Image: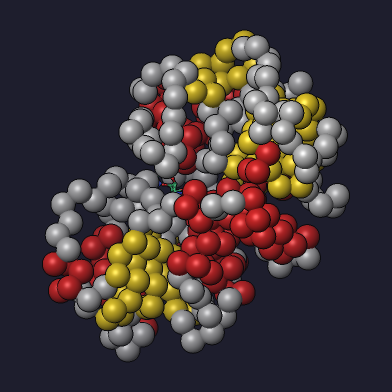
Amino acid sequence: MKAIQIDHYGGLAAMQQRELPTPVPKADEVLVRVHCAGVNFMDVHTCEGKYANSQTYKVSLPCTLGMEGAGEIVALGQDVKDLTIGERVAWCIVWGSYAEYAAVPAWRCVKLPDALSFEMAAASLFHGLTAHYLAHDVGQLAPGRSCLIHAASGGIGQILVQLAKRAGARVFATTSTEEKAAVARARGADVVLLYENGRFADAVLEATGGLGVDVVFDPLGASTLRDSFRATRKRGLVVNFGAVAGAVRDLDPLELGEAGSLFLTRPRLADHLPDAATMRRRAADIFAALLDGSLQIDIAGRYTLANVAEALHALESRRMLGKPLLAIDH
Ligand SMILES: NC(=O)c1ccc[n+]([C@@H]2O[C@H](COP(=O)([O-])OP(=O)(O)OC[C@H]3O[C@@H](n4cnc5c(N)ncnc54)[C@H](OP(=O)(O)O)[C@@H]3O)[C@@H](O)[C@H]2O)c1
């Protein structure tokens, strides 16, 4: 089968298309014929070696990239009881989806409602589950609460804005350009700001009577984190869930005290999907919202195994508005 692999860390240049044997599922895995794979920033980070020493997201080289997909089950490991051959499923945080076939742990698979396409399943699962735990479990968003969402036109950002509004929160959002700001507005953000070298924090303070928001969701890191502190109310929460602009390596906890006794967390999806029941509960909520039209996901581009590098380069260089997808040609 065709697959996209890295055998060393060297950025996107390390990716290669290879001909590999079709995987054989282990006892607790299913073999899936992949129809669609989500293209994610996590693949960029994986190529760069950011998970080389991670215990949460273990990467072993050679690694078939792609950690989200949708397809139909074609074989079952001997211990798999609750899935059947022919069933339509989606999965995430399992590498191996940039391939014609993937062996996926059964507990990481969610069944697809008939009305949900493979495309929409692959576009929604990873970012949808992430936005779900961020909005509900970490941010505890509810009427009367306020938040600031950075990179609001991005894959997670667009979903997070919609879940935050659904939860009743007042939503501030940031983007880098007016074109992206229009996307954040269309998704329902109440106030959309440009970063303007950190001046977004002054605008948030002004709009909140000098108080700041309850929660800031920051996937950028180095370029924004300290101004995110400024935009947060006293004893509020800063959620640094990514580092697309580089990691912050010189943070003294005293800064959190000076900024108003803030709470800072660096959460990961894997720790918010501890078991199959949690995975299915979150997925059911996201899929239901997609099917009743209350959640919208923009497909930013459709690619194939042959030109996936193009999609990842566009993500890396901030040119993507929404979610890129890979259609797997068999
Ligand atoms: N912790 C978790 O559970 C979890 C789960 C999933 C993903 N993540 C992480 O969340 C981050 C965002 O992922 P995503 O897939 O949703 O990406 P994305 O939002 O589609 O793309 C990243 C966005 O970040 C903004 N950005 C700001 N500075 C950037 C820079 N220097 N380089 C590139 N983009 C920059 C860009 O929007 P503007 O141009 O508007 O700034 C861009 O659209 C990644 O670090 C990913 O690994 C974390």
| 250 lies left or right of 67 | left
Q: Is residue 268 visible?
A: yes
Q: Position of residue 65 (x, y in %)?
A: 53, 28
- Quadrant housing the N terminus: top right
Question: Which of the 4 image quarters holds residue 37?
Answer: top right
The answer to which of 211 and 275 lies nearer the viewer is: 275
User: What's the coloring here?
Assistant: secondary structure
- Residue lying at 44% horizontally and 38% vertically, measured from the top left: 57
- Residue lying at 45% horizontally and 70% vertically, measured from the top left: 139
Q: Position of residue 30 (x, y in %)?
A: 71, 31
- Quadrant housing the C terminus: top right
The answer to which of 190 and 100 lies nearer the viewer is: 100
| 317 lies left or right of 71 | left
Q: Is residue 205 visible?
A: no
- Residue lying at 37% horizontally and 46% vertically, measured from the top left: 244
| 177 lies left or right of 298 | left
| 241 lies left or right of 291 | left
Q: Position of residue 318 (x, y in %)?
A: 44, 44
Please say if 307 is above or below 325: above
Please say if 190 is above or below 86: below
Q: Position of residue 260 (x, y in %)?
A: 22, 78
Question: Which of the 4 image quarters holds residue 203?
Answer: bottom left
Q: How many marks?
A: 0
Q: Residue furthest front?
A: 79
The answer to which of 224 and 74 lies nearer the viewer is: 74
- Residue lying at 58% horizontally and 68% vertically, measured from the top left: 163
